Image (cartoon, helix red, strand yellow):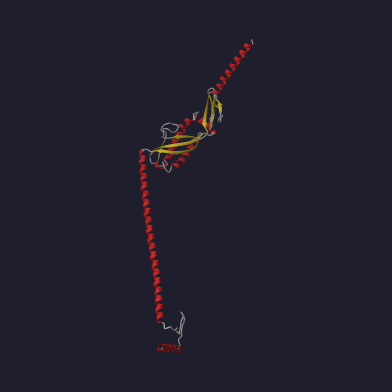
Amino acid sequence: MKKFKLTRFLIGLGVCLVLFLVGFGTYNSFMQWIPAGHVGLLYHASGGLERNVYSPRRVFVGWMTTLYTYPTQEQAAIYTSDPDEGEVKSADSVKVTTNDNANTDFDIVVWYHIAPDDVLKVFDNYKGQPIEQIQSSVIRSAVRQAASNIGTQYDAFSLMGEARGEASTKLTTLLQQELGQRGITVDGAEFAGHSPNPAILTRITAQINAETDLNIAKTRQEIAKSKKDIAITLATAQAEAARLKSAQTQAKSLELLSIEADISALKKWDGKIPPIQTKPGQTVVVTPEVLRAVTSTRRGGNNE
């Protein structure tokens, strides 16, 4: 009897253990993870959407219940002509018509996320579409429209070159206005690359060659102007040097003539100081007595 009771106990314990394991496994199979950088919503087929936003965790998703997750961390939507890049593995670039009537394929990247406060808005707007579908349809459509509006403000050459940064800023602003009201926060957008058709490439090559020729002509003109300025400066310097040399020679010649005149006067001097010496601006009155004295002196000197 005791052995029978022990057997029943062990069987019951085994059944309970099996039931526990089955129940735990079943319960565990209904558990799903909301990954980091995401939030989740639960939609019940019988009761509709549960208006509660779940943070990253492991949640129980029962029968006829669906867990929807949305990224709160930044995501990159890539629309490119490279079939190996982007969420659509095919040529998915955006065709932009510029104001010179050129159609050019541009690679565009959009960085976005869903703010926790906007998750319910996104779900209501798109009826539970997964974020991948929203990215490939809604965001892409908005990018096409915004890029077309911006393309009319530039020609193809500038949009592929110096104006690309400015156009990317405008694209970001338009997408923020368009998608923000739908609950999608755009962090940035950029014209990342381009794939011009042969006609555009020919025009680009011609424009580059024309600008290169113009730059060469400007450089040659600057060189010629520099040579002219150098020649004028050199001629002016030579003329000034000649003038200074002439002035120095003339000054020396006048000084030499003065010295020669002084030497000639010294040779004629008899060694006697004149009895009458005047200074500039001085008036001399010669009396008869002085005149006789001078005459007498000269006669006496001639006798000697």
The percent position of residue 127, horizontal first and vertical second, equals: 50, 28
The percent position of residue 107, horizontal first and vertical second, equals: 43, 37
Which quadrant of the figure has residue 82? top left
Q: Which residue extends farthest top?
A: 1
Q: Quadrant of the N terminus?
A: top right
Q: Which residue extends farthest front?
A: 304
Q: Residue at x 63, y 11 (%)?
A: 3
* Left or right of 181 on screen, residue 105: left
Please state the total of marks drawn on the protein image: 0
On screen, residue 8 above or below 104: above
The percent position of residue 133, horizontal first and vertical second, equals: 47, 30
Q: Residue at x 59, y 18 (%)?
A: 17
Q: Which residue extends farthest right?
A: 2
Which quadrant of the figure has residue 11? top right
Which quadrant of the figure has residue 88? top left
On screen, residue 187 above or below 230: above
Q: Quadrant of the C terminus?
A: bottom left
On screen, residue 163 above or below 299: above
* Left or right of 126 on screen, residue 96: left
Q: Residue at x 37, y 56 (%)?
A: 227
On screen, residue 246 above or below 266: above
The percent position of residue 157, horizontal first and vertical second, equals: 39, 42
**Residue closest to the eye, 145 or 216:** 216
